[in-house]
Amino acid sequence: MKLATLKDGTRDGCLAVVSRDLKHALKADHIAPTLQAALDDWDYCAPQLEQLYNEVNARQSTRIFDLDPQQLMAPLPRAHQFADASSFLIHAELIRKSRGQDLPDGWKKDPLMYQGCSDPLLGPCDDVIAASEDHGIDLEMEIAVITGDVPMGVERDKAGQHIRLIALMNDVSLRNLIGPELAKGFGFFQSKPPSSMSPVAVTPDELGEAWDGRRVHLDCHAWVNGELLGKPNGGKDMQFNFPRLIEHAAKTRPLGAGTIIGSGTVSNRDRSTGAGCLFERRAEEIIAGGEAKTPFLKFGDRVKIEMLDAEGRSVFGAIDQAIAQLVKT
């Protein structure tokens, strides 16, 4: 099934079930007021939401309405936590190679992961607000899973059982703030502002054979101002799959229902598939023997991220948003 959160003037919005073709929806607040509430009591809510999903697909309710992505918040507008990884190592390899550095051996054995901004998370059509273009505004096309409760120390072969939903994300990065911030030795903070999520989050069964319980084997598409940036495959070259990432995140702590685990920038070794972020394209330009020519995002630019199934149908809907300047009040 496909789940979304409608804007209703509250912080957490109203839970809705969306048709498979993403054209219609039904409010589900009589089952659970929010997606977080549904995740908190998943075994009770999921069967009822599934029944509602069947109704909206069959157009069997008078309460069905046409869905406008502009009406949507992020599926989880404020998640308990967002743990973001870097599981496509070619991304890190390109960045480090452009700086004349090798990839440390330890990075191939143990996932990189940091605590991202989870409150707020932006809706699919919300503007990305930045204070200055000088910060080096970049998109990062990612796949994410949303978990149920995960016990501390979960074993890898059991970690996948806790995946409830899958979504796309634009993990916004302020590239020119990352270096100085990491140089302090205390990790990301100001360089990682709010990220955005796809219109819907879907249960794994919606992906059919494209989901093998560990990876999503479909192409991710990213456009900047209508120009294709890349269409790498989410299943290829993913060094650390989602159960492995969940195991890593839960090594020293339990994960509460509603935890988001990000894949990091989707990227393939076959560079003909393009880039999953502007930083990768700039790295390729430097490696080719020149300077980075591709600019970072400017105010007024538009970013679109979408995943299509084998028949060319949108799975999660599109993240389609503008870059806008902060207006101080």
Image (cartoon, helix red, strand yellow):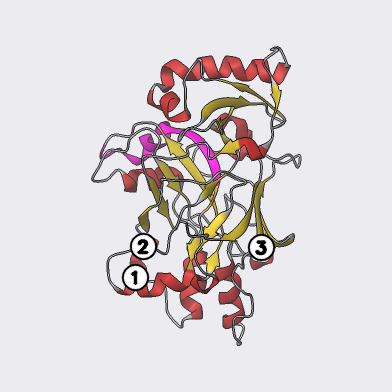
Camera-side residue of 317 and 128: 128
Whether residue 85 is in magenta: the answer is no
Amino acid type, callout 1: Leu
Residues rendered magenta in the picture? 152-168
Q: Which of marks 2 and 3 is nearer the N terminus?
A: 2
* Of residues 129 and 216, the one drawn nearer to the viewer in this rendering: 129
Q: In which quarter of the image is residue 285?
A: bottom right
What residue do we see at 61% from left, 31% from top? 206
Quadrant assignment, res 80: top left
Mark yes or no: residue 315 visible.
Answer: no
Tally the marks. Answer: 3
Inter-mark Cα distance, 1 to 2:
7 Å
Label ID, residue 182: 1
- 328 vs 139, left or right, is left
Q: Which amino acid does label 3 sit on?
A: Asp
User: CA–CA distance between discs 1 and 3?
Assistant: 27 Å
Magenta run includes residue 153: yes
